[in-house]
Amino acid sequence: MKLPRQGRMRAAFVMLIAFVLQSIPLPTALDVVRPPLLVLAVVYWSLRAPGVGGIGIGFLSGLALDIYRGALFGQYALATTLVAYIGVRQHLLIRNQTPFQQGLFVFASLVVWEFVVWLIDGWTGQPTGNWSRWLPVLSGTVAWPLVAWLLERGDTHAHR
Amino acid sequence: MAAFASGKRYLSQRSAPIDLRFVGYAAACVALMFFDQRGGWLETVRYGLRATAYPLELALSSPSAAWRFTREIFEERAALQVENRALRDENRKLQLLAMQRARLERDNAELRALATGATDVVEQWLHADVIGSETTSLKQRLTVDRGAVNGVFEGQAVIAGAGLIGQSFRVGPWSTEIILLSDPEHAVPVQLTRTGVRTLALGSGETSLLSLPYLPLQTDVRAGDQLITSGLGGVFPAGIPVAEITEVRRDGNSPLAQVRARTYAALDRDRIVSFIWPRTAHPAAGGKPRAEQGGDPDARK
């Protein structure tokens, strides 16, 4: 945040990594439980450095997901933007919470994210899938501490 | 509340309030969804975006593709080799079968032709495979795999395909040398079907070509006339198709016409020939009684 330009570069790089990790083809058994790393990264940046990307980064990430997954244009974008908005809006509150409570917040964010996508699927008459579409919410929550730790570590090193 | 206030202050440094920006983005998303659902120009955009995303997709799928590729190289090599060997074996077998089938088809066609070419004077026939041939301008001979033990006798008429090809010449126990019509030493008594004129057809030394040197200039003969055996001479039964006149030359220096004919049977190509036994009671049968012919055709019935 001291160097917004450099911060944005870093954010873009991290988002790219997250996108790649989320998009690499995996066997179906692993794919259904793959944590939504891109969304986790969006949540992280919203909480950690709202000034770097904020809502815009959420919007762009969501559009990337729309394109890559062949979804309705704006579907993932809306969900991810909403999650980013909530994160930015609440970042000062959440930062002061315990890791467990932060985890709860991430869980709630993922639920909202998946819920929006699910709603739009339903409204636009696309297949809504079964319960397994909610598995990434759980795996994402489980993966959150690791993701946050990794990103935090990178941040600390970068700013030293 | 202090934390919240500081957040507001921080956020107020941005160009637009966070709520407003969110509403803007959300509206953009909804608009996108609306237009995308309606179809139209967004289809083109999506098409273009998918095109630009393709290299990325390719790159993303490359690790797993590489993994599969490596696994195939190392693990499936043996399996592929086994499969390859099996396929090669099978291919060889099939090639053999195909060759056999082609041969059978050819044989079948020739046998059909033999059956139709034989006249009703033929009482019995014996098929033989050609196992050797000599077709020079001095000798036109075939060797076949039937001989005295099969009842073949010397001077027996041999037909193939569409007509006569010659007669047995030297009979061995298991094989026979056949002298072809086109052998320069061979002559066959023939008759022109159109006019009934009888003459001799001599071998020319060229495959399938006969010459008829004993026809006077004024003989009514022309290209296209058919020649059959006349039944004279006692070797060939009458009525077997022999050849078709191809060329008639008359020049004033010679009292005889120069006539050439081409045999119906393809002397150089037939692979199956038939020895024939004429019906002895038939008026068209050759002069020699069968008892004198040495062989016992009934044994081969």
Image: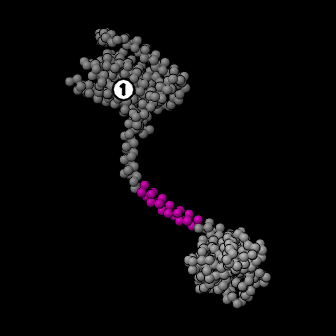
Tell whether A74 sits left or right of A51: right
Work out which residue is located at the far front of the displayed protein and give it: B253
Question: Would you say residue B44 is visible in this rendering?
Answer: yes
Residue B101 in the magenta stretch? The answer is: yes
Q: In x, y percent, where is residue A86?
A: 39, 17
Which residue is at a point 39% across and 46% down the rendered structure image?
B69
Main SS, magenta residues: helix
Which residue is at a point 30% across and 24% down the rendered structure image?
A9
Q: Which of the pair A134/B218 is nearer the observer?
A: B218
Instruction: Find numbered disc 1 in the image and state the secondary structure of the residue it sits on.
Output: helix
The residue that mark 1 highlights is: A40
Residue B294, compared with residue A158, is above or below; it is: below
The quarter of the image holding the C terminus of chain B is: bottom right
The magenta segment is B80-102
Badge 1: chain ID: A
Q: Quadrant of residue A106?
A: top left
Residue B89 in the magenta stretch? The answer is: yes
Which residue is at a point 37% across and 40% down the rendered structure image?
B63
Which residue is at a point 73% across and 72% down the rendered structure image?
B221
